[in-house]
Image: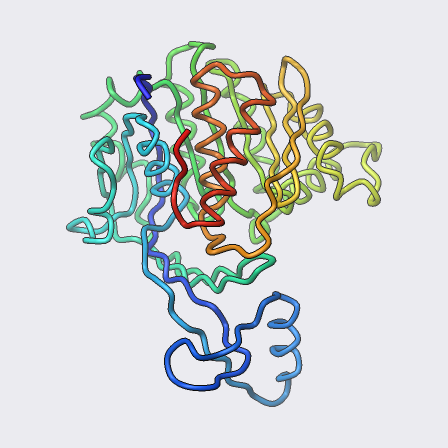
Amino acid sequence: MNQHFSAFVGFDGFIDHIFIAVDQRFGPGNNFKKIKKIKQFAERIVNASGKSTNVEIFPLEHRIGGNGPILAQTLAFYNVSVQLIGALGHPIDPIFHKLLPKINPISIGNPGITNAIEFEDGKLLLGITQPLDCITLENILPHIKKNSEKIFSCDVLCFTNWTMLVHLNEILMFFKDHIREDRQKFCFFDLADPEKRSNDDIYNILQLIQLYTQKRTTILGLNLKEAEQIAAVLEGHQSTNNLSSLEKSDIQTLCHFIHSQMKIDEIVIHDTACCAAVTSFGPAYVDAFFVKHPKTTTGAGDHFNAGYLLAKLQKKSIRDCLFQAHKISSHFVATGHCCKL
């Protein structure tokens, strides 16, 4: 690939410990039957209520984690030059030394920890996020000023993991006020499962995201669960209900509803079965490359987002953007690696 695109990505950082849960053990090592479905795991936990239980989790690997680093690493794999600011350790933890040469990493604190238990139908992420309290405007401002020309001239600015970064609104206000107007460039937002934030907090960040449309083409990326949460918040702030409960799992309906309520340039929603987008140029829908036996699911959404953004930079049609995003994501889920395009 000979394109020369650039991206800024911020501001989280995690070390991911990937596990599978053991159902029955027959011998040492990997001689066991795994718990395949989240419901099976949940039933085991519920049955222990008022008693106790032991669930073995079997380690698979430790790897780069966090929406920002995974997104940055995937974009860099496809020849995008990346400015990454995040919680990567002081000094930068050796696990992040695996970041590709096309990434310029700047660390402002120690990474969080995610213990991810993976199942065939999803994953359970147990996160330690306290280290991310260091991600404040005060702490990142010297790095932004030192690298301002590189950062603000990037083709796409990516802001990830709002849910876990409690000071991110102030940082986003700073960026909004300092980026130059250029509708040929993009701003991308990944809220990252905002269920634990209040409805008022969620509504406020949605209002802030809308302000970015004054400067750049603005994209909000969501998975299906996140889209349902966002739709519920938006529905709660209007006088009439336009989204019935029967429609809330319909990805295209959700996409149109959120786009109409937020009035930003693009809403993109992905799921294991399909993905959809509604943009200023119209809607698009693509069926997923369903992976029956995933090798990994942690990071699948970040690979989807990277594929979509890369296609946007390549000026592909919206449908082709969705197709490329799902191709990259599903290949990662099936193999644990990026695919060649």
- Residue 10 placement (x, y as % from top left): 35, 36
Query: Where on the picture, by quarter, is residue 62?
Result: bottom left
Quadrant (top left/top right/bottom left/bottom right) for the C terminus = top left
- Residue 324 placement (x, y as % from top left): 51, 29
Q: Is residue 248 left or right of residue 117?
A: right
Q: Is residue 187 left or right of residue 16?
A: right
Query: Where on the picture, by quarter, is residue 99?
Result: top left
Quadrant (top left/top right/bottom left/bottom right) for the N terminus = top left
Examine the rendered structure and indicate whether residue 245 appears above or below residue 322. below
Q: Residue furthest bottom?
A: 51
Identify the residue at image location x=33%, y=44%: 135
- Residue 269 placement (x, y as % from top left): 61, 35
Q: Residue furthest left?
A: 91
Examine the rendered structure and indicate whether residue 173 appears above or below residue 73. above
- Looking at the image, which is closer to me, 225 or 175? 225
- Looking at the image, which is closer to me, 99 or 50? 99
Query: Where on the picture, by quarter, is residue 244?
Result: top right
- Residue 292 placement (x, y as % from top left): 59, 54
Identify the residue at image location x=50%, y=72%: 21
